[in-house]
Amino acid sequence: MTEPAKDFWARADRDLLDRWPKDASGAPETAARLDIQWELDSRADLTVSFLESCGIPAFLNGSLGKVLGGFAAQGMEIWVPASRLEEAKELLDTPVELPERD
């Protein structure tokens, strides 16, 4: 018996599909695009790591410009489960409070 093909977004991280929320039938929940961020400054990777650390599974998609420039010149799309989209937006919109220096 062969394993069914996984969706494109689950290929980047082999454990992502295990962490991704499932619907009542056990199928992976629909992904929703959260944002488009630049890859050159690692911002997109940092955002995905931050979301994952907050318990929100996330993945990057996009490769425009990678072949010629080595990075996605048009930015990388960040995707999260549709049910966690608003929570992810709130996390990214929360201002960071830095400690005061002496």
Image (cartoon, rainbow, N blue to C red):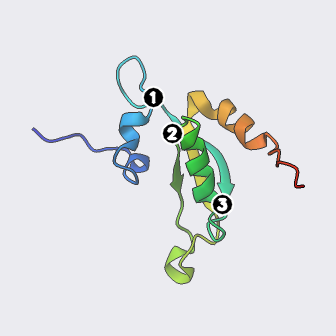
Q: Image quadrant for the C terminus?
A: bottom right
Write the residue at 52% across / 74% down: 66
Which residue is identified by label 1?
A: 21
For the residues labelled 2 and 3, the Cα–Cα distance comes to 17 Å
Cα–Cα span, label 2 and label 1: 9 Å
Question: Compared with residue 87, is residue 9 higher up or lower down, i.e. above or below?
Answer: below
Q: Which residue is mark 2?
A: 57
Q: Earlier in the sequence, mark 2 or mark 3?
A: 3
Which residue is rendered at x = 43% and y = 22% of the image?
23
Spatial separation of the CA atoms under disc 1 and disc 3: 25 Å
Residue 25, picture quadrant: top left
Residue for point 63% across, 34% down: 85
Q: Nearer the viewer, residue 71 or 67?
A: 71
Front-most of residues 4 and 87: 87
Q: Quadrant of residue 93?
A: top right
Mark 1 or mark 3: which comes first in sequence?
1
Crowding at dot 3, Cα within 10 Å, few <14 / some 14-19 / many 20+, comes out as: few
Three-letter amino acid code of the residue under disc 2? Pro
Which element carries disc 2, helix, strand or loop? loop
Q: Are marks 2 and 3 in contact (CB under 8 Å)?
A: no
Q: Residue furthest bottom?
A: 68
Question: Which of label 1 and label 3 is nearer to you?
Answer: 3
**Relative to 88, residue 50 above or below:** below
Q: Secondary structure at mark 3?
A: helix
What residue is drawn where x is 53% and y is 78%?
70
Circle 3 is placed at which residue position?
Answer: 43
N-terminal-most mark, 2 or 1 = 1
Q: Nearer the viewer, residue 29 or 13?
A: 13
Say if residue 32 shows up in the picture.
no
